[in-house]
Amino acid sequence: KVIAEGSWKPFDTLNEPHMLYSHSKVFTSTAIGFLVDDEKLDLDDRVAEILADKLPDNPSPELKSLRVRDLLSMTMGTPGHRLKGDCDWVKMALAKKFNSAPGTNFHYDSDATFLLAAIVERKVGRSMMDYLNERLFTPLGFGRVSTSTSPCGIPCGGWGMYMTTRDISKLGQLFLDEGMWGKERIISAEWVRLASAKQTKTTWDEADWRLGYGFQFWRCRHNAYRADGAYGQLTIVMPDQDAVVSMNAGLSN
């Protein structure tokens, strides 16, 4: 049930798609979740084996050890920056130097999420957005959805998706109901538990940034967790209150 909703002129974010920025990440991780549920991917699969044709010459031991779960939990071990330029972004991301061993230190890096999108497309053999449309957007009744892509056509994964506030709230409701949409199982309760749980500690100081990171979800106070994008794109799932709050905004703080 919708408790309350609103939108302020000149915007109509309830019906018109809005830029999600990093809120996009949870949709990419959900695509990974479908593959894990279907046993087409394991969290401990090595990225270097999945994307073997994109590796640099003489790949480092760190790159060879990098797992899918390290990308999901932002413990890739490389410095964060936004991929750009007219080049192969997968090769660029895999050529980055490592600051620490994968799986050891949290470092927020949208390149990791882009690599997850590339892995999804490698595993399903088609567009990640088409795959999400089949498995998520159509069953939940999403409206118009779009994304920006790399020069090679792979969705940015960690940013660039456009959806309405109503539609992002549907993902929150799906996770609140542990993967069920009405009477239909969309994704496993085990994936919801893993994605929303603290997978690694975070090093940021502010209250709702220091409580840990899941699989592209942030942990919050009061046993809540959230998808979070720049300038105020939020979906907050509150199991103790049996509630979800979603919003889109354009605020600098």
Image (cartoon, helix red, strand yellow):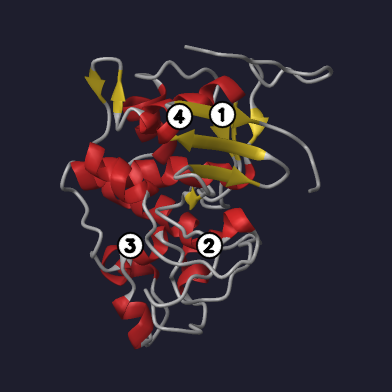
Residue 111 disc label: 2
- Please state the horizontal and vertical placement of residue 47, each as a whole percent of the image: 32, 67
Name the foreground residue: 189 vs 136. Answer: 189
- Please state the horizontal and vertical placement of residue 204, each as a whole percent of the image: 61, 66
- Please state the horizontal and vertical placement of residue 32, each as a whole percent of the image: 33, 47
Residue 245 disc label: 1
- Measure the alpha-carbon separation of dots 4 and 1: 11 Å
Q: Residue at x 58, y 52 (%)?
A: 151
Callout 2 touching callout 4 (CB < 8 Å)? no
Mark in front: 3 vs 1: 1
Instruction: Mark yes or no: residue 125 visible.
Output: no
- Measure the alpha-carbon separation of dots 2 and 4: 34 Å
Q: Secondary structure at mark 4?
A: helix
Q: Which badge, 3 or 2, comes first in the chain's sequence?
A: 3
User: Disc 4 marks which residue?
Assistant: 241
* Image height of 44 relative to 34, above or below: below
Mark in front: 1 vs 2: 1
